Structures are given as structure tokens and as C-alpha cells.
Image (spheres, rainbow, N blue to C red):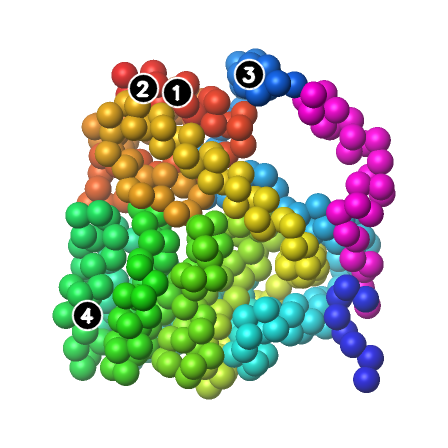
């Protein structure tokens, strides 16, 4: 039987050497101007570019400013003329590839228009039974709000003193009326991560009483992803669901591709609430991203370097911060977030919205070196 894999049926997969050859001097022209600069000269070059910048630096949406994989970009370019087609066959091929990489059956995978759709429809499915959902505050609320709209009561548990999930306190809130426990790991907005052994034990025990949903949107940006992912609990048959997205690490926020890993019977039930389908360019880009082995570790290294540099600035200003593991940093500004945001906007930097109840803390996304040069200068001025 002929395979429907996109790498052979829809577009040729190029390795990075082939990509560089195919783009030739056009690509070289983008890099030759800076590749021979020393580190100090490069820093000055970035500062000079920053000084001439007119558009705002957007560090508010946790997007990946380094952009998609070169192979993903090529895949989209090669399929532009086919964008009038629905992506049924291509989506099936991507689903198969994801299942292989996650070590589960295809029946365990549900595709979504970003992981946001997975959160939304999972919440709608569980919310039909009202009851309660246990989560943390502050935390990411899309799934929780979907349940709340259906009549579910939200039980919010404060983070601990390290701004991490307090698993013991969350477990204590689980009752016979609990319909789900939601954990975003790393947490948004704090960026903190849960100890994997503790989370595994927690999820196994709590999932005997109710479903446990673990949102791993940012986990691929963290160190040692394999040691921290909970997808193995799905393989082992526990009542656990895991969500992932191509919007963060893979730089495809504008293409809206995500997926969930859960029990097959749950996939069927949740799928009934789906509202649309994936777009062709997003699907071929996601497929190419997974087939580009070099992209993820290179991008994680860039994000980590930017994260560490931002922490150095925050520490240098004497501000408290949460230990970050995503592509953003959450820190205390010493002023109302509305005032901080206005001051940063005046310096041409856009930061994230407020996250109650921590209304003097700010979340800043890691940007390009040029973006962060502007941000660092703004922070030193605003927080002085």
C-alpha cells in the first residue's frame, strides 16, 4: 500500500545542507554581514540596529521570534500553490508521525487548531457534567474557563512560595465532585516546572478519581524535556491527557497546529466538540519541523541564552523572579503592572497582560538578541 507520508507524497524533505544550497546567495546575504564580527562588535551592531528601530518590540505573546525551521519554511513555500486544498491526507500523515514520536497509537492522538482548541473542546466535554475543576492561581485558564462557561465551579489553589504548583494542596481539593485537575507545566505565567517524579506520582493517584490534564505547551523549551514529559502515563493507560503545540518551540503560532495525547475513547468523545480543521500550510510546516532533528536543540539553546540574559538584568535590578523553564520570565516590578506596561510601552516594548492576583509582576517573552537589547535598556530605565 502506498504511503501518504508528506515527506514523499507532497513535498521533498530537504536536509539543512540542501536548504542552504537551494537558497544560495540570497540566504548568505542575510548572514555574511555579521558572521565575522567579534562578540563585542556583534553586541554593538545589535545595539545600533535597536536604536534605529521604530516598530514596538513585541514580548507579550510568548511567540518564538527565531521563526520556524528552515525545512518548515521550505515546505510552506513548496505548498503555496496547493493551499486551495483541504489538508485531510496531510493531517492524517502528520497524526501518524506524531503518534510514532510519542510512542502511542494513532487512536491516542487528537489534532487541534493550536493546543488552544484541544483545551477548549476538552473543557467543553468535561464541563457538560458541571462539578468542579481544580487548578492554580495564577495559571493558564483557557480550559478552565471553557468548563466554567458550562457551569463548572473553579477551585483555585495558590502557588507555593517558589511560585510552583502545590501538588499536595491541589490533591487535598479533589473530591467526588471534581471533574478534572488541570496542570500547566511549565506554568504560564510563572514559567516554573513541577518535579517530574512528584508530578508522576500525583497524576497516577489523582487520575484514579478524576481526569488529569497536563498542558505541556512550553515543556519543549525546558531543559531535559524527555525526563519531564508525562506522555508515558497515557501509554500506561492512566486517565491522563497531555497537550502540545507547534506554536511555541517550533515557531508556528500563526499556523495554529496542536494536538492532545489521551485515551482513545476520550479522543472520540472530545472530537465531537471540534469546530474546524487544520490548514494545509500549517500541517506541512509541522511535519517538516518534526523531521528537522537539528532545529529543536538549536532553538532551545537560543531561548535559554536569552532567558539567562534577561534574568541577569532582573537580578541586577534587585527584583524577585520565578525560576523559568519556558520561553519567558516572570518577575516582580515593584509597581502596578498597568503602570509598568505603560512605561515599557513608552520605551517601545510591549509586555504581557496582568495576571491576578500578582498585579505587580510582569511576564516578558524571550525575543531575538535585537529585541532583548531594546528590552534590557528599557528595563534598566523603567526599574531604576
Looking at the image, which residue is at 57% across and 59% down? 257
The image shows residue 356 at horizontal and vertical percentages of: 23, 45
Which is more foreground, mark 3 or mark 2?
3
Which of pointers 1 and 3 lies earlier in the amino acid sequence? 3
Badge 1 element? helix
Q: Position of residue 377 (x, y in %)?
A: 41, 18
Do the CB atoms of the residues marked 3 and 4 lie less than 8 Å apart?
A: no
Q: Quadrant of the N terminus?
A: bottom right
Q: Which residues are magenta?
A: 9-36
Between disc 3 and disc 4, the foreground one is 3
Q: Quadrant of the C terminus?
A: top left
Which numbered disc covers residue 378? 1
Residue 275 is situated, as x and y percent measured from the top left of the image, at 52, 69
Label at residue 382:
2
The Cα atoms of the two marked residues, 2 and 4, are separated by 41 Å
Q: Earlier in the sequence, mark 2 or mark 4?
A: 4
Q: Is residue 61 above or below residue 341?
A: below
Earlier sequence position, callout 3 versus callout 2: 3
43 vs 53, nearest the viewer: 43
Is there any visible trace of residue 286 in the rendered image?
yes
Q: Please report the residue visible at 84 percent of the width from the left and 36 percent of the height from the top.
A: 24
Residue picked out by circle 3: 40
Q: Earlier in the sequence, mark 3 or mark 4?
A: 3
Residue at x 14%, y 70% (from the top left corner)? 172
* Figure check: 77 above or below 209: above
Read off the residue under disc 4: 171
Residue 170: % across, % down: 20, 65
Amino acid at each position: 500500500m502506498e504511503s501518504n507520508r508528506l515527506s514523499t507524497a507532497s513535498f521533498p524533505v530537504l536536509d539543512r545542507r540542501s536548504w542552504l544550497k537551494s537558497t544560495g546567495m540570497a540566504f548568505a546575504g542575510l548572514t555574511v554581514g555579521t558572521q565575522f564580527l567579534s562578540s563585542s562588535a556583534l553586541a554593538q551592531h545589535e545595539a545600533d540596529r535597536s536604536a534605529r528601530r521604530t516598530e514596538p518590540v513585541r514580548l507579550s505573546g510568548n511567540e518564538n521570534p527565531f521563526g520556524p525551521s528552515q525545512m518548515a519554511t521550505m515546505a510552506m513555500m513548496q505548498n503555496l500553490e496547493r493551499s486551495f486544498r483541504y489538508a485531510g491526507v496531510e493531517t492524517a500523515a502528520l497524526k501518524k508521525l506524531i503518534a510514532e514520536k510519542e510512542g502511542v497509537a494513532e487512536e491516542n492522538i487528537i489534532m487541534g487548531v493550536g493546543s488552544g482548541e484541544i483545551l477548549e473542546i476538552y473543557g467543553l466535554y468535561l464541563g457538560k457534567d458541571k462539578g468542579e475543576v481544580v487548578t492554580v492561581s495564577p495559571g493558564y485558564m483557557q480550559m478552565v474557563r471553557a468548563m466554567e462557561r458550562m457551569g463548572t465551579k473553579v477551585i483555585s489553589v495558590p502557588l507555593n512560595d517558589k511560585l510552583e504548583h502545590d501538588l499536595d494542596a491541589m490533591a487535598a481539593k479533589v473530591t467526588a465532585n471534581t471533574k478534572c485537575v488541570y496542570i500547566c507545566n511549565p506554568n504560564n505565567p510563572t514559567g516554573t516546572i513541577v518535579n517530574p517524579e512528584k508530578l508522576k506520582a500525583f497524576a497516577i493517584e489523582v487520575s484514579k478519581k478524576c481526569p488529569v490534564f497536563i498542558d505541556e505547551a512550553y515543556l519543549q523549551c525546558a531543559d531535559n524535556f524527555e525526563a519531564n514529559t508525562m506522555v508515558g502515563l497515557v501509554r500506561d493507560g492512566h486517565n491522563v491527557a497531555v497537550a502540545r503545540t507547534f506554536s511555541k518551540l517550533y515557531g508556528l503560532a500563526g499556523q495554529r497546529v496542536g494536538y492532545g495525547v489521551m485515551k482513545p475513547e476520550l479522543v472520540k468523545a472530545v472530537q465531537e466538540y471540534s469546530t474546524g480543521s487544520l490548514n494545509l500550510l500549517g500541517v506541512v510546516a509541522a511535519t517538516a519541523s518534526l523531521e528537522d532533528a537539528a532545529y529543536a536543540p538549536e532553538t532551545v539553546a537560543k531561548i535559554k541564552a536569552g532567558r539567562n540574559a534577561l534574568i541577569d538584568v532582573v537580578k541586577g535590578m534587585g527584583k524577585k523572579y520565578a525560576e523559568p523553564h519556558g520561553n519567558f520570565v516572570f518577575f516582580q516590578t515593584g509597581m502596578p503592572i498597568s503602570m509598568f506596561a505603560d512605561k515599557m510601552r513608552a520605551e517601545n516594548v510591549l509586555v504581557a497582560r496582568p495576571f491576578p492576583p500578582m498585579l505587580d509582576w510582569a511576564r516578558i517573552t524571550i525575543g531575538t538578541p535585537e529585541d532583548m537589547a531594546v528590552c534590557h535598556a528599557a528595563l534598566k530605565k523603567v526599574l531604576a
